[in-house]
Image (tube, grey):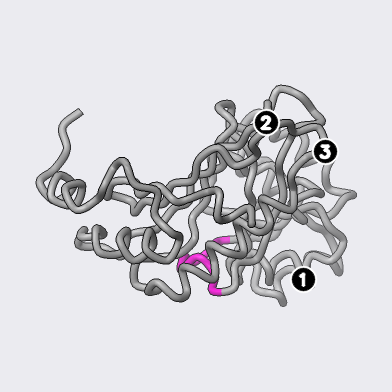
């Protein structure tokens, strides 16, 4: 795969054999974010669990102290007063069967988060095949299936992110933008890592955090000293 000149230049400034302290890793990543747009800084954490086993799943959601820097578009499946509550809280799209049909027939996906009241899950369930692969299926663990739709909408807008394992037991999450600066990124990093460590399954054996890397959208990854994070 061809790497651009900026990437190659940035990669030269990173010591591949070194495990950086979180603060140093984040300031290094910011210095390598040289694209013409405000790059997203992402955290990639490999865990010593097996996601194929139900008792070793790691999943949850957290509102980052400084948000993600992204304008989050929220769709809500609700009816009656709950639909009104969702709109009042700032939801971008609110609907029921009409919204389901729009997604099915028009391939409508102008949203980043889907929230639903429990009574609407029968309708939302019919969209499982299209919402599931996109990571958009509402889930009680992530707080996206709730009667308190106003709170769910506000948290999503404030920068709530969901963390979950992929098939290779890695969690990938945004922790902000390069323009945030090292201090705000550190706050978000600490909050997310704290949540991941707290979510350690009882069935997990051996080393829990295997590796931890921070990277900008277009830049190379910087390895973080995971041992220090476990404290």
**Secondary structure type for disc 3:** loop
For residue 67: magenta?
yes
Residue 49, which numbered label?
A: 2
N-terminal of the pair, mark 2 or mark 3, is 2
Placement of 157 over or under 216, stated as above or below: below
For residue 76: magenta?
no
User: Are the residues flagged by discs 2 and 1 in contact, CB closer than 8 Å?
Assistant: no
Q: CA distance from mark 1 to mark 3?
A: 33 Å
Name the residue that disc number 1 marks. 150
N-terminal of the pair, mark 1 or mark 3, is 1
Image quadrant where one finds the N terminus: top left
Residue at coordinates 77% horizontally, 70% vertically from top-left?
151
Q: CA distance from mark 2 to mark 3?
A: 10 Å
Looking at the magenta stretch, what is its main secondary structure?
loop
N-terminal of the pair, mark 2 or mark 1, is 2
**Secondary structure type for disc 2:** loop
Q: As drawn, is 191 to the left or to the right of 118?
A: left
Crowd rating for badge 3 (residues with CA inside 10 Å; few <14, some 14–19, many 20+): few
Q: Nearer the viewer, mark 1 or mark 3?
A: 3
Residue at coordinates 77% horizontally, 71% vertically from top-left?
150
Q: As drawn, is 197 to the left or to the right of 166?
A: right
Which image quadrant for residue 56?
Answer: top right
- Residue lying farthest top? 52
Image quadrant where one finds the C terminus: bottom right
Residue 68, which numbered label?
A: none
Q: Nearer the viewer, residue 39 or 85?
A: 39
Residue 202, which numbered label?
A: 3
Q: Position of residue 124 (x, y in %)?
A: 76, 41
Q: Which residues are magenta?
A: 66-73
Q: As drawn, is 122 to the left or to the right of 65?
A: right
């Amino acid at each position: 795969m061809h790497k651009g000149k900026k990437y190659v230049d940035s990669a030269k400034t990173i010591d591949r054999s070194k495990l950086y302290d979180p603060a140093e890793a984040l300031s290094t990543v910011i210095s390598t974010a040289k694209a013409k747009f405000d790059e997203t800084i992402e955290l990639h954490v490999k865990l010593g669990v097996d996601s194929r086993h139900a008792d070793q799943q790691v999943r949850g959601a957290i509102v980052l102290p400084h948000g993600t820097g992204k304008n989050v578009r929220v769709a809500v499946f609700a009816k009656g007063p709950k639909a009104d509550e969702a709109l009042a809280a700032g939801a971008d799209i609110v609907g029921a069967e009409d919204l389901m049909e729009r997604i099915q027939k028009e391939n409508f996906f102008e949203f980043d988060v889907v929230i639903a009241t429990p009574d609407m899950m029968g309708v939302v369930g019919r969209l499982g095949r299209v919402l599931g692969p996109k990571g958009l299926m509402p889930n009680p663990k992530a707080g996206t299936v709730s009667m308190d739709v106003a709170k769910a909408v506000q948290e999503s807008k404030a920068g709530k992110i969901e963390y979950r394992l992929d098939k290779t037991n890695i969690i990938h999450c945004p922790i902000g933008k390069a323009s945030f600066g090292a201090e705000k990124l550190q706050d978000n990093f600490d909050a997310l890592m704290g949540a991941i460590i707290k979510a350690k399954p009882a069935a997990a054996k051996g080393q829990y955090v295997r590796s931890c890397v921070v990277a900008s959208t277009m830049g190379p990854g910087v390895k973080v000293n995971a041992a220090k994070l476990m404290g």
